[in-house]
Amino acid sequence: MEPFKKTTSIVTPLDKVNVDTDQIVPKQFLKLVQKSGFGKFLFFNWRYDENEKPKSDFVLNDSKYDNSKILVAGDNFGCGSSREHAVWALQDYGFSVIIAPSFADIFFSNCFKNGILPISLEQSIVEKLQQELEPIEVDLESQLIKTSSTDVHFDIDSHKKKILLEGLDDIAQTYQFEEKISEFEKQSTIPSVL
């Protein structure tokens, strides 16, 4: 997992509430076994019509949001099933920050495990960010979102901040205790079955 410190980007506004993981990446695309390749399926049913032609009225099909790294969404983002593929699709598409008034718990946790920074902010601040036309900066170390007109502080659990700053997925976090695990195994009194 790549360390996350800060990013600067225009925001992609997704003014929808209760966006569930099946809307983020529909179930028919869950056949891949690796984390990459899901970006092309992100919001598939909203992005494309029945003939798989891009819908002109969906935000991701507007070229001014190409290369955006920050998605600003509505309340209860990532609800529904616990599929980690939803986070993989957002990341593979290019998003590294998601801002919303609230997130579903499992989705929120999956973001940190995969290097995406989810930020919960008050509804009124989210609405202002959705209308921001200039690039904004999200700085994890200082816990600030810097816009053209103001700085917005955001809260984050210190452990979650550390794993993003250092790029530590679950396996990398376990390896931090490799010496202690080895020592424990040496001292273990459990008899070997072999």
Image: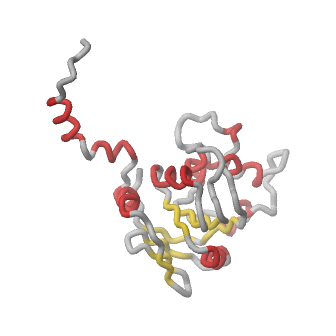
Percent of width and height locating residue 178: 23, 40
Q: Please tell me whether residue 160 is drawn above or below residue 134 in the rendered image.
A: above
- For the C terminus, the image quarter is top left
Closer to the camera in the image, 83 or 190: 190
State whether residue 132 appears in this view. no
Q: Please tell me whether residue 187 is drawn above or below residue 71 in the rendered image.
A: above
Residue furthest to the bottom in view is 149
Percent of width and height locating residue 17: 70, 62
Residue in the image at 60% along x and 78% along y: 125
Residue in the image at 73% along x and 60% along y: 61
Residue furthest to the top in view is 194
Q: Count the marks.
A: 0
Percent of width and height locating residue 170: 39, 45
Tell me: 18 left or right of 94: right
Q: Quadrant of residue 186?
A: top left
Percent of width and height locating residue 114: 47, 50
Residue furthest to the front in view is 189
Q: Quadrant of residue 15?
A: bottom right
Q: Please tell me whether residue 40 is drawn above or below residue 103 in the rendered image.
A: above
Closer to the camera in the image, 154 or 53: 154
Residue furthest to the right in view is 50
State whether residue 98 appears in this view. yes
